[in-house]
Amino acid sequence: MDRFVRYILLLAVLLVVSCSTEEGVEVVNKPLRVYKISCEERSYKLDYCSTVEIPFRVEDPRAVFNYAFSSPGCQVQLRLESNVRLQPESFSPIRVREDSVEKGLYYLTVGDNGTSGIYRERVHVAIKYETGELILSNVITIVSSNFVSGIAMVRLSKSSNPSLQQDVNFVYDPTTQCFTGHIDKYVSNRTFIPEFECDGVDYIEVNGKRFDSSGTPVDFSNDPRVVAHISGSQLEYRLHLTCFTGLPVLRINTPGMRDVWSKDEWVEGSLLSLDGMAQFENISNAEVAIRGRGNSTWGYEKKPYTLKFSEKQEVMGMPKHKRWVLLANYMDRTLLRNRVAFYLSEQTSLEWTPKSEYVELILNGKHLGQYLLCEQVRVDNDRIDITEMSPQDNSGSAITGGYLLELDFHYDNEWQWRTSRNIPFAVKYPDEEDLTNEQYQWIMNHIAEVEGVLYGGNYRNEESGYRQYIDAQSFVDYWLIYEICVNHELANPGSVYLSKDRSGKLVAGPIWDFDWGTFSFNASPQAQYGLFMQHAWWYDRLFDDPDFKALASERWALLKPHFEGVFDFIERERDYISRSWDTNFSLWGISTNINGDEQLSKEQATDRLIEITRRRIEIIDSKL
């Protein structure tokens, strides 16, 4: 009997230990879970890079959960009211502490992430279990200290816009007062019904019309202007919606979707449309002819093209003209080389530098990647502004210009010759069908005369020397661009241009073709140690002249601070084309190994370009 009683008593003790009681005996065999979270319904303000503590209570008060955000198990998080699958980007939970007195009361420390954004987010405190189950608190509001009454959020919801694959949440930039959103795929019709979350706003106007919150369609293709009316005052905003890569989209359709297969034969009657992405004026169905272009570049998979409009056309803010080119930049891992060279040229005294803008090219419905739409090198009032000649200009001062000349080792032009020093010259203007024999003979003789004087014994003579024929400053500035960019084409020579106006001197420029071997020491290892183009072409003789050397030093001292602005330019450009870079190289590989960065990542290749440009500026500075 005693043994039985002792057995019963032992079972009773075990039951007491393993079960909870109202007297507070702890559970030891299984942790209790959270069934409910509650917060005080209020707004919490966050200063830049600061923290705030948010109290919350859990039921059951004895529940166990993981305070460490990086650890598995039952975790404390923040989730957006608008989409509980997402966590806020502007602030994050940092730690949790338990109240020292009240059981079940905790304090969540939340920190601003330092993005400098203005935000007003409605969020839940959440506890997530390993199973994926979320326990959510009631909604609280977290507001940045720089937030003022007005529009707090702009959203395109999939529920109101069924064509969208997912919600689009806009990000606010207080410096430009612009809300920016992005859609991954290309959408030509960007009319959507937006949702505005406001604070203290009486009503909203979009493009001058009162907005109806029940669902007013808004055309986002031209950055709509939004005005929030607040107690008699107004706040203005801009809405900017990008899509695809964010770059303007150029679409060309040829008749019958005919292939563009030749550098010589135009595909006439094609139609060109430009979606300027609210950055540039749109173009709709302009008639254009298209053909291939380039020398070695035409042999690559990604083809470059020439465009010819039926009438002069302004394109992307660039002056009207019929002729344009689409540079493929196939071998350029950075996709920046030509743009950077053009930027540097614009800092000099060169009379004209081709303007350019990035586009996404869709040819006959097929996306071909990123291209650089450029002004073609042509004689025109808005391009190379020299006297335009006619076939009747065959004598007197009329025959002296204007001429556009190219030094080109390919030697595949209609009107071309080699000088006594074996320099390959070609006449690019007047056009081959307009140039007369008399004009051709005159410019050949003139170049021979200049070369003879330059290499003659009295070439430095102030009255009869080379300076009577050559604009020395343009030759210096032109040379500096080749030196900075590590472009050896000046020595080939290839794509080297000169112009001569009527009764004028030979002027160097414009620059062209800066994607092959540039901003790299691969093709020109000697550029790592000093000046490497001072012996190119006529420059070997020019640098024999102490006055030309002095001019080079003088120009460098003046231009160097302007050249150094290129680093900020590169940073802006790399951000602007970031999505486009990814898309382009998902379509195309690089089969060459010319520039030496073909296998690098986007960031590595661009950093390398910056490093080499900086190094070249240091080297030139030490030599001049």
Image (tube, rainbow, N blue to C red):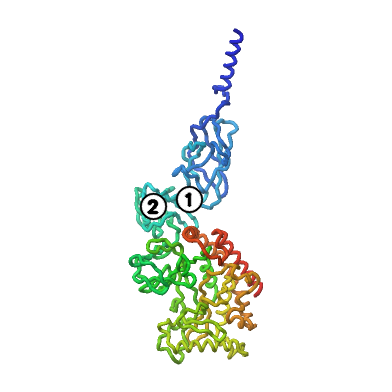
Residue bearing the label numbered 1: 148
Residue 477 seen in this snapshot: no
Q: Nearer the viewer, residue 79 or 150?
A: 79
Identify the image quadrant of the C terminus.
bottom right
Helix, strand or loop under label 1: loop
Is 406 rendered above or below residue 200?
below
Q: Residue furthest bottom?
A: 396
Few, some or many residues within 10 Å of mark 1 (<14, 14–19, 20+): some
| Mark with earlier residue (1, 2) | 1
- Give the x, y percent position of residue 524: 60, 71
Left/right of residue 550 with respect to residue 210 in the rendered view? right
> Where does residue 19 sit, x and y in percent of width and height?
55, 22
- Residue drawn at (55%, 34%) of the image: 65
- Residue 560's tag is none
- Extreme-top residue of the structure: 1
x, y (%) of residue 465?
59, 89
In this rendered view, identify the residue nearer to me: 37 or 521.
521
Question: In this picture, is 613 found above or below 509?
Answer: above
Q: Which kind of residue does numbered mark 1 sit on? A: Val
Q: Amino acid at mark 2?
A: Ile
Q: Position of residue 164 (x, y in %)?
A: 39, 51
Mark 1–mark 2 distance (CA, rounded to whole Å): 16 Å
Q: Mark 2 falls on what kind of element? A: strand
- Residue 204: give its label: 2
Give residue 287's quadrant in the image: bottom left
Q: Residue at x 56, y 69 (%)?
A: 518
In the depicted structure, whether residue 511 falls above or below residue 596: below
Q: Are marks 1 and 2 in contact (CB under 8 Å)?
A: no
Is residue 100 among what the camera can see? Answer: yes
Q: Quadrant of the N terminus?
A: top right
* Frontmost residue, 203 versus 13: 13
Dot 2: within a 10 Å radius of its alpha carbon, few (fewer than 14), some, or many (20 or more) residues? many
